[in-house]
């Protein structure tokens, strides 16, 4: 098992169920959050949602007794870039878009994130992948 293997002995069926549940919840999030956007600013909505998510994940992490992460000095720049872009700028842009577009449009556009991530991984970071990985099959 490599450092990136996070399967924790889940069956393939369980992993697929988790993945589909995640996709369903993400798909429900945009229409559910649209009314909220009429009441508060996009920055506040993004901050509250991501803060709640961080607290929930942190509590789960601690409850499971997970080891402390080891961050190598050379990775600090990438970590900072990830935190700023994925934890601050991207959520604000998502909620700004949700406030100014329909929930359906925003949800569909948010799904292009996986395409952009794949393209960046391949061409910017030299990540190799096979046709099976590209199609989503093991």
Image (cartoon, helix red, strand yellow):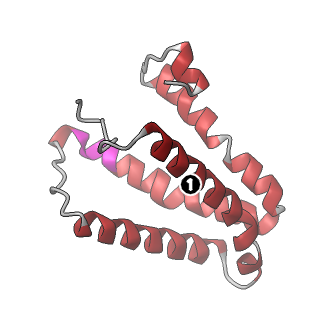
Q: Quadrant of the N terminus?
A: top left
63 sits to left or right of 107:
left
Residue 8 lies, in percent from the top left, at 29, 45
Which residue is pictured at 48% across the width and 52% down the height? 86
Residue marked by disc 1: 22
Compared with 110, 115 (above or below) is: above
89 sits to left or right of 5:
right
Mark 1 lies on a secondary structure that is helix
Secondary structure mostly taken by the magenta-highlighted segment of the chain: helix
Question: Residue 10 magenta-drawn?
Answer: no
Compared with 32, 24 (above or below) is: above
Compared with 76, 21 (above or below) is: below
Residue 96 lies, in percent from the top left, at 69, 64
Which residue is pictured at 72% across the width and 76% down the height? 37
Query: Where, by quadrant of the figure, is residue 103 drawn?
Result: bottom right
36 sits to left or right of 122:
right
Residue 108 lies, in percent from the top left, at 76, 48
Report the front residue among 62 and 76.
Answer: 62
Which residue is pictured at 51% across the width and 72% down the height? 47
Report the front residue among 131 and 17.
Answer: 17
Residue 127 lies, in percent from the top left, at 43, 21
Report the front residue among 121 and 78.
Answer: 121
Which residue is pictured at 54% across the width and 35% down the height? 117
Residue numbers of the magenta segment: 75-79
């Amino acid at each position: 098992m490599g450092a990136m293997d996070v399967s924790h002995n889940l069956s393939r069926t369980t992993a697929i169920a988790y993945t589909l549940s995640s996709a369903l919840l993400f798909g429900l999030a945009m229409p559910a959050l649209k009314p909220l956007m009429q009441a508060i600013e996009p920055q506040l909505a993004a901050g509250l949602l991501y803060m709640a998510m961080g607290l929930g994940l942190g509590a789960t992490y601690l409850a499971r007794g997970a080891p402390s992460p080891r961050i190598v000095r050379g990775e600090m720049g990438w970590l900072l870039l990830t935190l700023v872009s994925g934890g601050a700028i991207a959520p604000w842009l998502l909620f700004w878009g949700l406030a100014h577009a329909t929930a359906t449009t925003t949800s569909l556009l948010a799904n292009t994130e996986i395409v952009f991530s794949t393209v960046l991984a391949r061409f910017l970071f030299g990540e190799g992948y096979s046709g099976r990985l590209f199609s989503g099959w093991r």
